[in-house]
Amino acid sequence: MDADIYALSNDSPEEHKHLKEELGFTFPFLSDASMDVIEKADMKGESSSVRGYSVFDENGELIASEENDFWGEEIEQTAEKIKQALE
């Protein structure tokens, strides 16, 4: 799959660093305190970001988004949905 992967939330960079190290993720974690990108990704809750995934095309247009608290546990299904969105 030809895609860039990022974790995005309104958590602080310090919180991201701790979580990234704790879970052993290798992709970048991005902090969006203003929630501008989170809103564009359709992942904005009432006061924080929600869990799920969003897919943007090469022009920065949102082409798929799904709120899902279990995207990590359901990584195979999530990966398949992302692949379909990129086709």
Image (cartoon, rainbow, N blue to C red):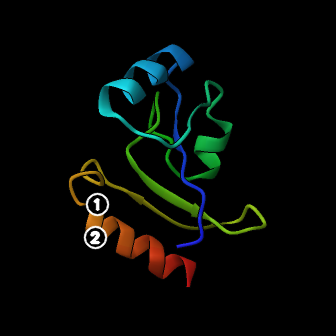
- The residue at 52%/73% (across/down) is 1
Taking the spot 52% from the left edge, 58% from the top edge, the residue there is: 54
Q: Residue 36 placed where, x, y %?
A: 68, 38
| Left or right, 19 with reference to 10 | left
Kindly identify the amino acid type of the residue bearing the numbered disc 2. Gln
Image coordinates of residue 52 in percent, x first then y, are 39, 52
Q: Residue at x 78, y 66 (%)?
A: 59
Among all residues in the image, which is located at the extreme bottom?
A: 87
Report the residue marked by disc 2.
77
* Furthest residue toward left: 73
In this view, the residue in front, 24 or 13, is 24
Q: Residue 65, labelled with which disc?
A: none
User: Alpha carbon of mark 2 to alpha carbon of mark 1: how far?
Assistant: 6 Å
Disc 1 secondary structure class: helix
Q: Nearer the viewer, residue 49 or 84?
A: 84
Q: Position of residue 75 (x, y in %)?
A: 28, 60
Screen quadrant of the C terminus: bottom right
Whether the residues at callouts 2 and 1 have beta carbons within 8 Å, the answer is yes
Which residue corresponds to mark 1? Answer: 75
Residue 46: image quadrant is top left
* Residue 5 percent coordinates (x, y): 54, 53
